[in-house]
């Protein structure tokens, strides 16, 4: 009886071990070969965006396109500049149109809100390489209208990484990020840690599994003005992830938002983000004026 029980326990252990190996292998395969679908959730078109208008659309592969909408209620005079906003993994332009963009507009900033392929009414699917190329083109297009010295690029969560590479390619007046991850692997690891049943997978060598471990340190050139806002209570993209090897505080200005979680840091930080944006535009104007005097 005892030996039979031991045999059953051994068989169960082997079976569980096989399941664990299969889960790890499947996760590694997804991270290597199907990461696009994991990063960019498919979302429905927005219900209502008020007076927003589609500014332009950038075609990608296989019928995909990035849509950029303009929010400008002409509340403030004069207009100081433009903000190109890149959202997180689930898009949500209708949410930002109600909770964030009006504050930017009242401060005299015209908002150009990006919708990734497959999200917020933009045809999909999204592919990382497509999104990166289209994002840089989107910023270049806005810069052509507003001027590089009057354009700030902003992004939150996943969009922070997209924004960083786009800004690094175009060099606008500045870059403002919120709830950012220092690297793609750190962002994936944070998402895995959020769910107890996925936490063991966070120990995988994700930076070696993904085809390219995008990072803010790689994206941001030394001459670009940057401000990063991180919530002190954010467990998804914790402030502690920004170590020296990731382009930490000694290189990039990181502002701690007291009590901010991954969900509400944007609301807590937006009134500090706006002066940062306006300061970047002012600094660009002052630098241009000084250069003209020389």
Image (cartoon, helix red, strand yellow):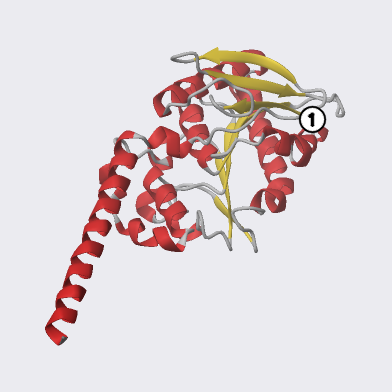
Q: Report the residue marked by disc 1.
A: 108
Specify the farthest residue to the bottom: 2
Tell me residue 83's x, y (percent).
66, 29
Would residue 3 appear left or right of 12 to someone viewing this image? Answer: left
Residue most toward the front? 1
**Residue 232 versus residue 252 in the image, above or below:** below
Q: Quadrant of residue 243?
A: bottom left
Position of the N terminus by quadrant: bottom left
In the displayed structure image, the side of residue 115 where residue 37 appears, left or right: left
Horizontal and vertical percent position of residue 172: 56, 26
In this picture, residue 95 sits left or right of residue 254: right
Picture residue at 44% right of the left edge, 48% below the top: 187
Q: Quadrant of residue 132?
A: top left
The quadrant of the picture occupied by the C terminus is top right
Q: Judge whether 181 appears above or below 107 on screen.
A: below
Name the spot of residue 118 as percent of width and height, x first.
54, 26
How packed mark 1 is, by other alpha carbons closer than 10 Å (few <14, some 14-19, many 20 or more), is many
* Total numbered circles: 1
Near-viewer residue (227 or 261): 261
Residue 220 in sight: no
């Amino acid at each position: 009886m005892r030996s039979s029980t031991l045999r059953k326990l051994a068989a169960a252990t082997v079976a569980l071990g096989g399941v664990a190996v299969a889960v790890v292998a499947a996760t590694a395969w997804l991270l290597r070969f199907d990461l696009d679908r994991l990063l960019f959730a498919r979302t429905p078109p927005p219900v209502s965006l008020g007076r927003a208008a589609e500014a332009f659309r950038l075609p990608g592969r296989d019928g995909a396109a990035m849509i950029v909408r303009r929010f400008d209620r002409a509340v403030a005079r004069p207009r100081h500049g433009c903000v190109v906003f890149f959202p997180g993994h689930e898009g949500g332009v209708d949410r930002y149109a109600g909770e964030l963009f009006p504050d930017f507009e009242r401060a005299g900033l015209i908002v150009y809100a990006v919708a990734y392929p497959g999200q917020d009414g933009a045809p999909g699917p999204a592919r990382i390489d497509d999104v990166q190329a289209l994002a840089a083109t989107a910023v270049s297009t806005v810069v052509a209208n507003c001027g590089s010295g009057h354009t700030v690029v902003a992004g939150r969560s996943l969009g922070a990484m997209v924004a960083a590479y786009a800004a690094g390619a175009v060099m606008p007046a500045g870059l403002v990020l919120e709830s950012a991850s220092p690297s793609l692997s750190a962002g994936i690891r944070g998402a895995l840690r959020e769910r107890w049943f996925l936490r063991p997978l966070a120990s995988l060598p994700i930076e070696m599994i993904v085809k390219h471990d995008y990072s803010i340190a790689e994206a941001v050139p030394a001459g670009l003005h940057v401000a990063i806002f991180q919530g002190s209570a954010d467990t998804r993209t914790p402030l502690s992830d920004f170590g020296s090897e990731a382009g930490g505080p000694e290189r990039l200005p990181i502002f701690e938002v007291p009590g901010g979680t991954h969900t509400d840091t944007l609301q807590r930080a937006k009134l500090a983000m706006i002066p940062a944006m306006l300061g970047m535009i002012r600094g660009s104007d002052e630098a241009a004026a000084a250069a003209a005097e020389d």
